[in-house]
């Protein structure tokens, strides 16, 4: 971090600042020009509050040279991280599709979809047991029972399961879940992230509705700082002024995140668009942009789905999507 001091800064205040910084284990490189004095802060500055430093009387501007996320930063970990879920690998050139219904509704519904998506080449099964719904009157998920059914579908198909956690108190219920999803609405639930950091489970961390990429990486950092480096990032669309789609898919997030972090990045074109017809073209585009995988909502009877039917593909549509994705995969841009 660099602090540019005001022209007639108070020497005593500078002494106070430097001794405080030394207490924080920061070394200081002072550069005294004719008009400008610059302090170069050397060491781990990630815990320093840049806003506080920039409001000090003697400071003109403060600028971070290094990003505030260390564990997730590609600079300190140049190789791609590969996340293993059973035999499935995501990242570092390993591409995988997670597919399944928005919500677990019944054993028959889930198992039928699971068999179908497996036959088309999905590597993992998704299904919401705890559902974050905008309306308290909408279907809230089968909760514990939903997780039981997911485990049964895993037993039948061998597909690892991915399901969303909404509250810290539910964590014991997730002990046999393969990948724990943190949904967009919980991306900044820091207490939840800290607890997930103490587990060794792969975490699928979805980008918040109005979050920047740096905020997404700071949330990943919460999990990683606790010792869990198994984080998969997910771009799932952000809120913009556009109302024609449910969200706006920020595809540039894929190559940008690839530069910023070594963590795998997957894309969710279902929640990004909210429209079944748009899911295939966006899935293909995300693959071409270098995504490490996709998460796709699939339902055996979309018009009667209890949640997100409008964006759900039928198993046949999913099979067709998979073929198109496979066609572009060899040409995907990964550098
Ligand atoms: C989901 O995947 O079912 C979900 C609710 O997604 P998001 O958190 O991205 O809205
Ligand atoms: Mn959904």
Image (cartoon, rainbow, N blue to C red):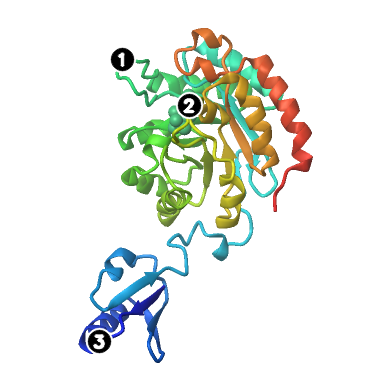
Mark 2 vs ligand 1: CB under 8 Å?
Answer: no
Give the mark, 2 or 3, whose residue is nearer the N terminus: 3
Give the mark, 1 or 3, whose residue is nearer the N terminus: 3
Q: Which residue is mark 1?
A: 137
Residue at x-position 22% and y-position 86%: 10
In space, the residues marked 2 and 3 are separated at their CA atoms by 54 Å
Marks 2 and 1 close (CB-CB < 8 Å): no
Q: Is residue 123 visible?
A: no
Image coordinates for residue 186, horizontal then vertical, percent: 37, 38
Mark 1 vs ligand 2: CB under 8 Å?
Answer: no
Count of labels shown?
3
Using residue 330 as the reference point, say whether residue 180 is left or right of it: left
Marks 2 and 3 close (CB-CB < 8 Å): no
Q: Specify the label residue 15 is tagged with.
A: 3
- Of labels 2 and 1, the one closer to you: 2
Q: Which residue is mark 2?
A: 246
Mark 3 is surrounded, within 10 Å at the Cα level, by few (under 14), some (14 to 19) or many (20 or more) other residues, namely few
Residue at x-position 47% and y-position 62%: 70
- Of labels 2 and 3, the one closer to you: 2
Image coordinates for residue 121, horizontal then vertical, percent: 70, 27
Q: Secondary structure at mark 2?
A: loop
Between 198 and 246, the residue placed more toward the observer is 246
Image coordinates for residue 318, horizontal then vertical, percent: 66, 21
Using residue 197 as the reference point, say whether residue 116 is left or right of it: right
Occupied quadrant, residue 307:
top left
Image coordinates for residue 61, horizontal then vertical, percent: 35, 72
Q: Secondary structure at mark 1?
A: loop
Would you place residue 313 above or below residue 289 in this image? above
Mark 3 vs ligand 1: CB under 8 Å?
Answer: no
Residue at x-position 64% and y-position 59%: 79
């Amino acid at each position: 971090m660099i602090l540019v001091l005001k022209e007639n800064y108070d020497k005593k205040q500078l002494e106070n600042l430097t001794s405080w910084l030394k207490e924080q284990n920061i070394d200081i490189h002072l550069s005294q020009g004719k008009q400008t004095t610059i302090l170069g802060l050397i060491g781990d500055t990630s815990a320093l509050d840049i806003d506080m430093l920039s409001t000090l009387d003697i400071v003109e501007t403060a600028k971070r040279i290094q990003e505030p996320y260390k564990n997730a930063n590609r600079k300190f970990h140049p190789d791609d991280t590969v996340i293993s879920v059973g035999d499935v690998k995501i990242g570092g050139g390993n591409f995988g599709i997670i597919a399944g219904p928005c919500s677990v509704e019944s054993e028959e519904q889930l198992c039928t979809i699971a068999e179908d998506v497996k036959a088309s080449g999905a590597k993992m099964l998704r299904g919401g047991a705890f559902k974050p719904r905008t309306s308290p009157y909408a279907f809230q998920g089968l909760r514990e029972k939903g997780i039981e059914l997911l485990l049964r579908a895993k037993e039948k198909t061998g597909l690892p399961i991915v399901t969303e956690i909404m509250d810290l108190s539910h964590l014991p219920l997730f002990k046999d879940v393969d990948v724990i999803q943190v949904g967009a609405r919980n991306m900044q639930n820091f207490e939840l992230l800290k607890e997930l950091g103490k587990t060794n489970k792969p975490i699928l961390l979805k980008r918040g509705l109005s979050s920047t990429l740096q905020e997404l990486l700071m949330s990943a950092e919460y999990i990683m700082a606790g010792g869990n480096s198994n984080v998969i990032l997910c771009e799932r669309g952000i809120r913009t002024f556009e109302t024609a789609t449910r969200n706006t898919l920020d595809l540039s997030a894929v190559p940008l995140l690839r530069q910023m972090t070594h963590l795998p990045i997957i894309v969710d074109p279902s929640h990004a668009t909210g429209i079944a017809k748009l899911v295939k073209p966006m899935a293909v585009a995300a693959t071409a942009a270098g995504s490490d995988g996709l998460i796709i909502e699939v339902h055996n009877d979309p018009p009667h789905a209890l949640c997100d039917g409008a964006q759900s593909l039928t198993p046949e549509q999913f099979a067709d999507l998979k073929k198109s994705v496979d066609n572009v995969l060899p040409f995907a841009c990964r550098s």
